[in-house]
Amino acid sequence: MLTLAPHPSPNISAAYCAASQRSLETLLNCYCREVAIPEGHASVGLLFGHNDWPLALRCALATGQALHILLPRLDSRVVTAVQHASPTGNYRYLSAAYCKTAGQPWTLLDWHALACLVIRDLAAKHDQPFNEELLAQIEDSVHVTTAILEAPWSTGIPADPLQAYLDSEQSLTYGHPFHPAPKSRQGFTAEDLRRYSPELRGGFALHYFAVQRDAVHQQSTLDQECTAIVAAQAPQGLVTNDDFFLIPAHPWQARWLLERPLIADAMRDGRVRHLGAQGELYYPTSSVRTLYQAGNPYFYKFSLHVRLTNCVRKNAVYELEGALQVNRIMGRLIPELRALFPGTAIMEEPAFLSVDLKANDAERNREVSEGFGLILRRSFDADNLQPGAVPLLAGALFGNHVLGEARMAALLRQVSEREGLAPEAAAERWFSRYVQQVMYPVLHCYFAHGVVFEPHLQNVVIGLVDDWPAQVFLRDFEGVKLDRERFPAAALSGISQRARDALLYDRELGWKRIAYCLFVNNFCEAIHQLGTGNPVLQQRLWAQVHRHLQHYHAEHGSLESAARIADLLAGAPFPTKGNLCNRFLKQADRSVAYVSLANPLATAIRNQIC
């Protein structure tokens, strides 16, 4: 018999209720897309076969349909009301969720009960024990989301372009809609959460260390060394003698570093000095560990030994090397991209630094090297930001639940009124321009050069001019991979074997990575939000993706792209990343399994023709 584990009741608040409901919805999203739909155990339609459905569910179905999810391994079923069926599993939920197990009455599910149900089912599916770690991550995500929702937030977009940008980075209220624990931050205390979470809009000064020059490991593709760039942005008066370099750190990470035995040893013998918090405020962006300061020509991407969703976010030395190698490659490709796709900007990562204390204890030495790892990422300037452009994180507009929906609605309302367009026409035209800006350079980098970008919603910044998409900024070289067939080992001779292993992907895996990020994580969410409650408009938006794929191939295609695009246009399934199963199995992100997801492209174009 299935029993749902009890859990302590927190202080019930509107914020907690909203966070709980959204956690339940994202769990349903994940389970349906990764397990129930592929197994044929999810369907949307009328209530069927039983007369004992909960009354509240019957009432919710006045404006929707029932989503039935069967869990035969547990002899259970879950039902909830959704707005309408979705081939991609992008549902708009209209009710609570209810569970019925054989021999038991209907049970109202909260996030905890559903999480236990899902984890037990995955345990049975994979013949594994119950994953307590995943349950703890989900719980942490609920409490973080609650704290975020308790703070004030606005649907308006600031008038100043760079303030609007920072606001977009700090507005991801709910996080990834297809991750079981999108806001999990294991390692943060409640005070850490208040101080360092981007959604709570705070800023903080960096901590600085003075490190003996021969213990600093750095590389740069610029005329200046990384330490010289950092020193130029450091607070005035914070100087060291010629034997030391200034090394900044995120304040949470500084505390972590000061607890390392090797740092304590180095501070005693004078090779490292902790200078404390210094200077003007920096502001966390959506990744939490990448910081922005107006006027600084670079973002600082720090190590942060906190598990954020899937990974502990540290900059290993091989990742520093890999980012710089990608930067060298992209340096050669950027002129071509600008010529072919003038709205494309690459947020380069031209320098890094770390600390190597050369200790005999390899594990402690690696810990310190990873702990200090810092990547410089180019910020916005007059050379890469078009006049009048407002850069906004795509994730703030799409995949951001009610807040993103409100912001997009406001943008489209302005466009519609100014241009004299019907609302649906404005949405269709806006989305067409968005697809063109994002898709073309990503496909070209892959098909023409074997460079695999990861254009998910948190890696894409869209530049709006008069509210229309006019630019795309692609970022995060940690997520960029290289096609093994295009980049043999000899082409990457300047980096370590570990860095090469991390960078190189087989062609098929590289394509899955792009196809998932572009069509599923990005376009599925955009279409779901722009066309919510309107399946006909959603099909018209998918038809725009179809049209742009055809146009890309006609203008820029090759033999390399022909088969892939033909398959997509014919309706070959999209690959979708299994975040839930990956977390359950405790696998590294590189080992994640992809499952097939319905591709609406062929259906959408047929319906347009009809």
Image (cartoon, rainbow, N blue to C red):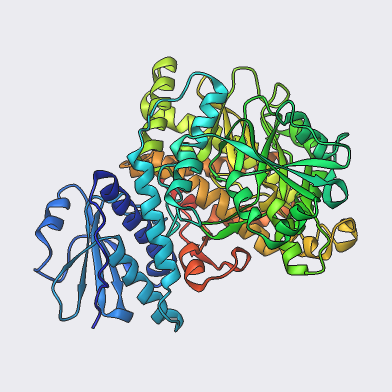
Residue at image position (59%, 63%) is 589
Q: Within the image, what quadrant is residue 247 found in?
A: top right
Viewer-nearest residue: 7 or 180: 7
Q: Within the image, what quadrant is residue 246 found in?
A: top right
Q: Is residue 133 above or below residue 396?
A: below
Instruction: Locate residue 115 relative to residue 134 in the image: left or right.
Output: left
- The answer to whether residue 450 of the structure is visible from this angle is no
Residue at image position (77%, 29%) is 232
Viewer-nearest residue: 475 or 309: 309
* Residue 1: x %, y % from top left: 23, 83
Viewer-nearest residue: 146 or 82: 146
Instruction: Locate residue 202 relative to residue 263 in the image: left or right.
Output: left
* Residue 404: x %, y % from top left: 41, 37
Instruction: Locate residue 446 relative to residue 84 in the image: left or right.
Output: right
* Residue 351: x %, y % from top left: 79, 42
Q: Is residue 330 above or below residue 580?
A: above
